[in-house]
Amino acid sequence: MTIMRLNKRAARVAVVLSLLALSGCSLNKFMSDQESVNYKSTVSGEPLSIPPDLTQANRNPQYRAPEGAATYSKYAQGLAATKAQGSSESDVLPTTAGMKVMRDGDLRWLVVDKPAQDIYPKVVEFWGDQGFTINSQDPQAGLIQTDWAENRAKIPEGWIRSALGGLLDQVFDSGERDRFRTRIERSNGHTDIYITHQHMVEQVSSDFSTSKWVAGKENQGLNAAMLARLMVYLGENVDRARALVADAQRDPEQTSVKAQTTVGQADMTVSEPFDRAWRRVGVALDSAGFTVTDRDRSAGDYFISYLDTDTGQKIEQQTFFGRLFGTKNTAAPGHYRLHVAQRGDASSVVTVLDNNGKQDVSPTARRIITVLSNHMGTPSAS
C-alpha cells in the first residue's frame, strides 16, 4: 500500500513539475480582469435544496437574479463580447439599487435593501453556481456553510492545460481546500451579508509517502472577491461590483482587542461600541469555525457549540477524509452562550455564560475566549 501511494505521489509530482516547466503558473490577483477562482467541490451531494419555509420565495420570479446575471462568469463573458463588438451598451448597463459595500478594517460586508427571507434562498443558489455543495444551512440563524472545495483556477495555465483538458483535472491537485460560511443578518430594515472562509493546505512529507492537512490563513481578498461575485448574482453589473468592493472606505479608527484568560478570568474587551463589537464577534466566530446554533442581538447573545480538545476526554482519531470533510468525533461538543455587552460609550466586553446566566471562567471558557480573540486581529493577552 505504501509503495502504491509513493508511486502515485511521485507520478503526480513529476507531471506537475513538467507542466510547470512548460507552461508556467499564472495566478490572477483579486479583482483582476480574468477569473481567479473556479471552485470544484470535493464532496458529491444532491442538488441544493431550499428549506421548506422558503420554497415559495424561491419559485417567485421577482426573487430571481435578472436574466444574464445568473453567473459571474457568464455575465463577464457577455460583457466582454459586448465591448469587443464596440457597443456602447456597456456604458449604460443597469445597476441594482439598494446594494452597498461597508468596510471595517479588512472586513467587508454587503448591505441590501431587501428582507432577509428574500435574500437567503438566492445566497444558497449562488454557492451552488460557484461549484460548491452545501454542508449545512440554518435559516433561523441565517447561516449557510459550504463543503470543502478546490480552486481549480490554481492549476497551471497554457497550451498544456488546453491539450490535456480533463486528464489534467484528474491528475493535478492544488493541495489547497476552502469552505465558505455566509452569515445573513437583519439590521435596521436592511439585510447584512458577511462572507468568511476557512483554508486548508496539504503538507507532504519529504519522501512524498504521506501527507496531512493543516489549517491555513484566511485570505480577506478572497472573501471580498466572493462578495463581488454575489453582488453580480444579485443583479449588479461586473464593473460596478468590483468598484464598490475595491473602493469601500476603511474606518480610520484602530480597534484594539484585549483578552483576559488567566485563572479566574475569561473575558475580552473590544474598543468598539456594541453594534460594531457584535458584528466583529460574529465574523470572528465564523472565521474560527464555531458552530452558531442561534443568536439574540437584543440580548447580545451568541449560542455556540464548542468541542474542547484539551479536557482529556477521549476523542477518536480521525482518518484523512474525516479531518478534511468534518466527520464527527466520538466526543460531543458542549453548548455555550457568548455574551456581548457595551461598557461605557466606546468599548464592549465579551464573556462566556453558563446555563444560569452567570459568567463562566472555567478552563474551557478561557480557551473559547483565546480562540475567538485570535480571529479578531492582534489581541493583547494577559
Image: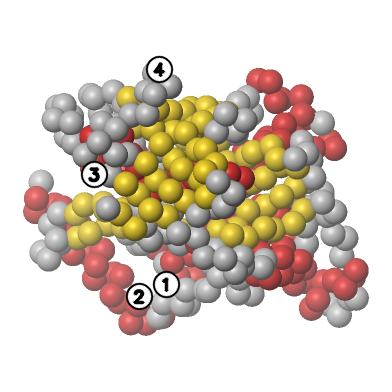
Secondary structure of the residue carrying numbered label 3: loop
Task: Give whichever of discs 1 and 2 has the lower sequence position.
Answer: 2
What type is the residue that disc 4 sits on?
Answer: Asn
Please tell me whether residue 227 is drawn above or below residue 369 in the rendered image: below
Task: Give whichever of discs 2 and 4 has the lower sequence position.
Answer: 2
> What residue sits 71% from the left and 25% below the top?
55
Which residue occupies the foreground of this view, 223 or 279? 279
Give the labeled residue for mark 2. Answer: 19
Between the C-alphas of marks 4 and 1, the distance is 56 Å
Between the C-alphas of marks 2 and 4, the distance is 61 Å
Q: Position of residue 217 (x, y in %)?
A: 37, 60
Secondary structure of the residue carrying numbered label 1: loop
Give the labeled residue for mark 1. Answer: 156
Task: Give whichever of discs 2 and 3 has the lower sequence position.
Answer: 2
Q: Position of residue 54 (x, y in %)?
A: 70, 25
Between the C-alphas of marks 3 and 1, the distance is 49 Å
Q: Position of residue 324 (x, y in %)?
A: 31, 43
What type is the residue that disc 1 sits on?
Answer: Pro
Please tell me whether residue 43 is drawn above or below residue 202 in the rendered image: above
Between the C-alphas of marks 2 and 3, the distance is 53 Å
Give the labeled residue for mark 3. Answer: 262
Q: Which mark is residue 356?
A: 4
How many residues crowd mark 3 within 10 Å: few (<14), some (14–19), many (20+)? few
**Are the two marked residues, 1 and 2, in contact with CB atoms closer than 8 angstroms?**
yes
